[in-house]
Image: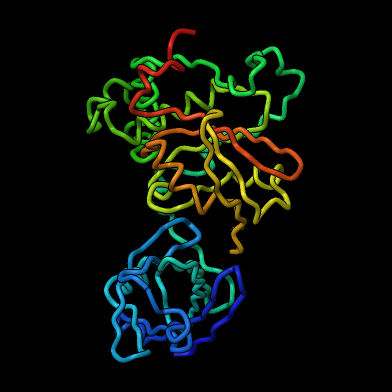
């Protein structure tokens, strides 16, 4: 098995593995001995392999001697997920805390195409991120009038159960018609009777309803982005920033500390990081999980991040829209 270790300092330790037919048949992959000697101490079992499409897989390892370590249980499933074949390559970047970023390359040397992961399918980043509002004068009359306090930035939103049900039903009808041509000539009511699970209690569907309402109604005189909290943001200490927002407003700010706050009473420190993979992306790391836990963020909640930049410092005021409270929170009361 051919391998090579690369050290890029603060960007993590890299090693390369060429996939051979024997590797696929055995269902195991050997970790380079040089990497094990220098970096394996304290490694938990299983480790996490993270792909550019935000899919994460748990893989167990076994040690057959002092420096012979093999990825075993879970590795075969990981290889099958990527449809790996003989002579393809994988580059592993160790991020610490038993987490490896993994990039795959085909025989021709180009990066492989990754499957659409379940999290992306449920909460696609492009669908769950608000477009920038650059404060054009033509939109002034539509915006929320700013108060003297920079913290009163959230416009009240009104949602009712009927709107939620209509939004969900319309989405399910469109999906059904796309998959089954026979539905195209049927009445919408007839389609809903046939489709299973005709309920608004589904967590993910309700999260999408909440997000769509925030996307439509939230206004602020400052630049901001919004995202829906999905599984990756709960399980990992990171939150991805939409590329359009990051490259426009955070250029050359990567590597700095940023501050998250809801009001003046408390702040949370995070790192602003730009990933070094092919799909470069700004992320909030090293502190995001504390902010999420302290504010009890859950799957399906929506957060709006309002940017404040001053003399090289970066902070975000965070407005939280809780899925659990979407029918009773103040921002859903009468407008």
Which residue is located at x 34 percent, y 70 percent?
44
Which residue is located at x 30 percent, y 73 percent?
60
Q: Position of residue 109 (x, y in %)?
A: 59, 76
Which residue is located at x 54 percent, y 83 percent?
5
Please give left or right for residue 111 compared with residue 85 in the image: right
Quarter of the figure that contains the N terminus: bottom left
Please give left or right for residue 257 compared with residue 98 in the image: right
In this rendering, is residue 102 above or below 165?
below
Which residue is located at x 34 percent, y 15 percent?
162
Q: Position of residue 303 (x, y in %)?
A: 49, 34
In this rendering, is residue 169 above or below 28?
above
In this rendering, is residue 324 above or below 250?
above
Q: Position of residue 34 (x, y in %)?
A: 48, 88
Place residue 304 in its image quadrant. Answer: top right
Return the residue nearer the eye: 126 or 289.
289
Return the residue nearer the eye: 114 or 283.
283
Q: How is the image coloured?
A: rainbow
């Amino acid at each position: 098995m051919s391998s090579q270790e690369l050290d890029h300092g603060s960007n993590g330790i890299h090693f390369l593995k060429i996939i051979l037919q024997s590797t696929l048949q055995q269902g195991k992959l050997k970790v380079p001995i040089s990497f094990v000697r220098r970096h394996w101490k304290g490694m938990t079992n299983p480790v996490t392999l993270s792909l550019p499409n935000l899919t994460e897989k748990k893989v167990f390892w076994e040690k057959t001697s002092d420096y012979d370590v093999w990825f075993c249980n879970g590795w075969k499933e990981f290889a099958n997920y990527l449809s790996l074949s003989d002579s393809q390559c994988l580059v592993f970047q160790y991020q610490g805390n038993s987490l490896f970023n993994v990039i795959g390359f085909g025989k021709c040397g180009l990066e492989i195409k990754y499957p659409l992961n379940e999290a992306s399918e449920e909460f696609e980043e492009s669908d769950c991120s608000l477009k920038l509002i650059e404060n054009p004068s033509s939109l002034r009359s539509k915006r929320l009038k700013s108060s003297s306090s920079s913290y009163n930035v959230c416009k009240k939103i009104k949602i009712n159960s009927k709107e939620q049900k209509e939004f969900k039903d319309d989405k399910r009808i469109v999906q059904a018609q796309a998959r089954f041509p026979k539905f195209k000539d049927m009445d919408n009511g007839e389609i809903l009777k046939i489709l299973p699970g005709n309920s608004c209690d589904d967590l993910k569907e309700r999260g999408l309803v909440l997000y769509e309402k925030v996307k439509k109604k939230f206004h602020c005189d400052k630049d901001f982005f919004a995202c829906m909290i999905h599984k990756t943001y709960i399980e990992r200490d990171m939150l991805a920033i939409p590329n359009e927002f990051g490259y426009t407003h955070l250029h050359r700010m990567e590597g700095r500390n940023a501050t998250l706050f809801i009001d003046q009473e408390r702040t949370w420190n995070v790192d602003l990081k730009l990933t070094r993979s092919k799909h470069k992306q700004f992320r909030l790391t090293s502190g995001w999980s504390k902010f999420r836990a302290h504010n009890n963020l859950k799957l399906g909640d929506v957060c709006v991040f309002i940017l404040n930049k001053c003399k090289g410092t970066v902070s975000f005021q965070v407005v939280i829209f809780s899925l659990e409270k979407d029918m009773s929170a103040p921002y859903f009361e009468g407008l």
